Amino acid sequence: MLLAALLVGLLSWGFEYHAFKKLIEEPKNRLQAQVLLQYTKKDEKGERIVLKLRTQEGVQFYTTTKEPLQDLTFRYVSLTILPQKITFLDYLKGFYAPSYWIVLRPERDFRGPLRAWIEGQHKEALAGSLYRTLFLADPLEKSLREGASRLGISHLLAISGFHLGVLSGVLWGIFWFPYRFLQRRFFPYRNAFYDLGALTLLCMFGYLLLLGGSPSFLRALAMGVWGYFLLHRGVKILSFSSLLAVGIMLVALFPRLLFSVGFFLSMMGVFLIFLHLRHTAHLKGWINFILLNLCLYFWMLIPVHSIFETFSPYQLFSPLLTMLFTLFYPLALFLHLVGGGGMGDDWVLFGLLGGYESISVRATWPWMAGYGILALLAMRYLWAYVGFGALCMSFFFYAIYLFLG
């Protein structure tokens, strides 16, 4: 396993380094890229337009211009960048490069009609933006992003492993009855679990193509495929060693994941699920489901606040909203498929745009050190798991104290 990851890593990292050297070998480089995000920024240097772009090779970067531009979001452009100061780490993480001579290209994003179809079902532009994010992984409007952060549900609005799990469960249920009908009559020797698993993953791969190779969904799908492979080989997948193997293989395949905040948080989330199940597997299913969602909110506070600072007591609604989202997401998808996507827009926007007060709270290195040590010990010892939970709860009450103060 490690040898395979090493060989794959040498190839993929070598390919990325070759592409990086090709990018910087000339003082000026003409690129073709899609505009993922466009906004105006004002500071002491004046007003300028910021563009976030992605090339066909998956390289993401930022540039700015003072030229007056029309809205280029999701359009394709050609531009000349000056890449001399870019390092290999910058290349993998995403970089800024000065640019000039930005030219609009005639190509159109094939998802344009889908965006128009979704937006046409909503009276409010913000509602259309929300569902484009949920279904097509488009960037979320700032006001909605801030509201989601204050409610602690940002993970629900960024297509990732959670959405993959919900969609896979729905597809599994849809496929189950016709498959069983056919299986009894034509192929009773087939294993329904493996067949439906492969069919579901194939559908998810098609959805990945529709999303244009969304990095977060690609990461989640790769984890799903790897888990399916291990399960098919009889390897226990709900184990820390399997999770570590998946993480190593994914970083070997996709070097940019090493610098991805989303990858770090998703791996941490799966680790905490395994940690919780290790010590609570004896509990009944529905009780453990509720307890898991409650615990995950508190257990994730410290790693999340080591990166993001927004805290609000309203985030206590996060576990409940996460559980309800497993029903809301497929229902919203169904309503859009039948043309009724605008139902409930007022309530959804009211919930996201409510005037929730928040403060900035940072988890400093002592919190992170204690968190890491106890989390590792909790893999084996129940007392460490209890201490781990107590530390996370202590951080929550510390944040509440700062909020009230």
Image: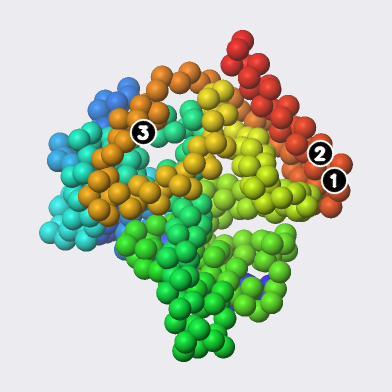
Q: Is residue 269 above or below residue 348?
A: below
The CA distance from mark 1 to mark 3 is 40 Å
Q: Position of residue 209 (x, y in %)?
A: 35, 65
Q: Residue at 64% across / 73% down in the picture?
A: 231
Which SS class for mark 1? helix
Answer yes or no: do the residues labelled 2 and 1 have beta carbons within 8 Å?
yes
Q: Is residue 366 above or below residue 15?
A: above
59 relative to 381, above or below: below
| Residue labelled with disc 3 | 348
Could you tell me the amino acid type at mark 2?
Answer: Val
Q: Amino acid at mark 1?
A: Leu
The mark lying in front, picked from 1 and 3, is 3
**Disc 2 on helix, strand or loop?**
helix
Q: How many marks?
A: 3
The residue that disc 1 covers is 382
Q: Describe the element under mark 3 as helix, strand or loop.
A: helix
Q: Is there any visible trace of residue 26 in the rendered image?
A: no
Q: Residues within 10 Å of mark 2 (few under 14, many from 20)?
A: few
Q: Earlier in the sequence, mark 3 or mark 2?
A: 3
**Precedes in sequence: disc 1 or disc 3:** 3
Q: Identify the residue shown where x is 12% and y is 59%.
A: 106
The dot on residue 386 is: 2
